[in-house]
Amino acid sequence: MPSEEWDALSVRECIVQLGVAEVGVRYVNGDFGWGDLGLAVFTGEDELGVGLPSELWWDIAMAALDACPDDESVELLGEDIFDRMRARPGFADRLLDEGTRNSRVARLFAVMERALRSERVTSGFWFQ
């Protein structure tokens, strides 16, 4: 779907038309820029400022994590989507839980810890 067509649809309609996996891939590829859909993935809120359903936002974030071609892109997701996600009730605990049993999330924790150590940060959420 060309960018001009995204602009004519609501964020939620775009997600339905593209599918969660495709939204995640396109977010990682930078296809959305800072338009409504890109901002929705980043903030977890639609163009009206209404929060996306938690499971939907989580699924999009997991699809984006799957689409990361390298650790640098994983780190960027950690610094944007996942750091914002932790502020929503229940998400920090879910990330911690998933980090012990989900290899994608475990990779996120490892990448974030390594990146933070390179900045001389040695404690905080990503070190748990």
Image: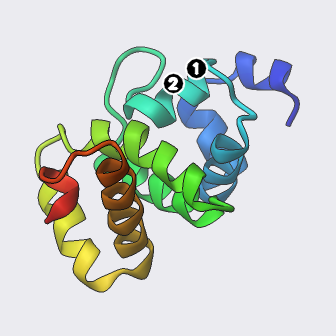
Q: Hey, what amino acid is under mark 1?
A: Asp
Q: Position of residue 67 (x, y in %)?
A: 65, 61
- Say whether residue 80 is left or right of residue 51: right
Distance of mark 1 from mark 2, alpha carbons? 5 Å
Colour theme: rainbow
Most extreme residue toward the right, as rendered? 2
Report the number of discs.
2
Q: Hey, what amino acid is under mark 2?
A: Leu
From the image, tell me which residue sits under label 2: 39
Q: Residues within 10 Å of mark 2 (few under 14, many from 20)?
A: some
Q: Position of residue 19 (x, y in %)?
A: 65, 54
- Say whether residue 6 is left or right of residue 67: right
The relative height of residue 8 versus residue 96 in the rendered view (above or below) is above
Q: Position of residue 127 (x, y in %)?
A: 18, 61
Marks 1 and 2 close (CB-CB < 8 Å): yes
Most extreme residue toward the bottom, as rendered? 101
Q: Quadrant of residue 69?
A: bottom right
Nearer to us in this view, 21 or 106: 106
Q: Quadrant of the N terminus?
A: top right
